[in-house]
Amino acid sequence: MKIWLFILNFIVLGIFLQCSEVKMPSKINAMNTETSKNNPYYSRTDKTKLNVSNEEWKKILSPDLYAVAREAATERPFTGKYNETDELGEYYCAVCGNHLFRSSSKFASTCGWPSFFEAEKDAVKYKRDSSHGMERIEVLCGRCDSHLGHVFNDGPEPTGVRYCMNSVSMDFVPDEKK
């Protein structure tokens, strides 16, 4: 009986850690608007690939955004500002303004992070992530190479994938404000 409880606890813990990483930002800002105002690289229209050093990003980004976007930290599950957002609009990279997702591809995955079944074409790129004893696929911004989250093959139709993203790495613009 004790072995079954141990196995059950191990499985439950694995589910909660599936998207998470050990390093955590100190706190998550409610809005990233200050970062975009003070960021000379932030643009929702420029698609030019950026080559900015982490030293430069550290001067520009908030500590929480820097920890997630440049050091691949993860916000705690169920704490992100967009986890339960269901408004119509667009999601952009909070670091550079690159268009990432349309809200119509967002779904309630109950994993604790905002989840999408489809990214905008050429908006993201992928990298193998073998950290923390797991094999995952990291999702990076296609313009600035910032860490956004991970992608898994357990999403809904039509794609069957789940982009598990950090809220702090994204900005959201509702349709009525575009």
Image (cartoon, grey):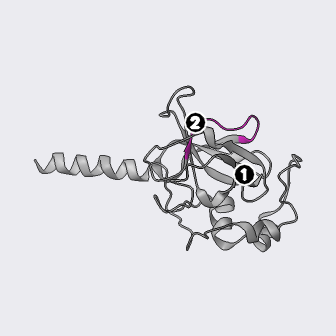
- Left or right: residue 74 versus residue 102 is left
> Which residue is depicted at the point 86% across and 48% down?
49
Q: CA distance from mark 2 to mark 1?
A: 23 Å
Q: Which residue is mark 1?
A: 176
Q: Which residues are magenta?
A: 115-124
Q: Residue 103: within the magenta? A: no
Local crowd at mark 2 within 10 Å, few (<14), some, or many (≥20)? Answer: many
**SS under mark 2:** loop
Residue extending furthest toward the front: 176
Give the foreground label among 2 and 1.
1
Q: Which residue is mark 2?
A: 117
- Left or right: residue 3 versus residue 49 is left
> Which residue is depicted at the point 46% across and 53% down?
112
Please determine whether, in this image, residue 142 is positioned above or below residue 26.
Answer: above
- Left or right: residue 154 versus residue 139 is left
Q: Earlier in the sequence, mark 2 or mark 1?
A: 2
Between 170 and 72, the residue placed more toward the observer is 170
Between 35 and 129, the residue placed more toward the observer is 35
On residue 112, the disc is none
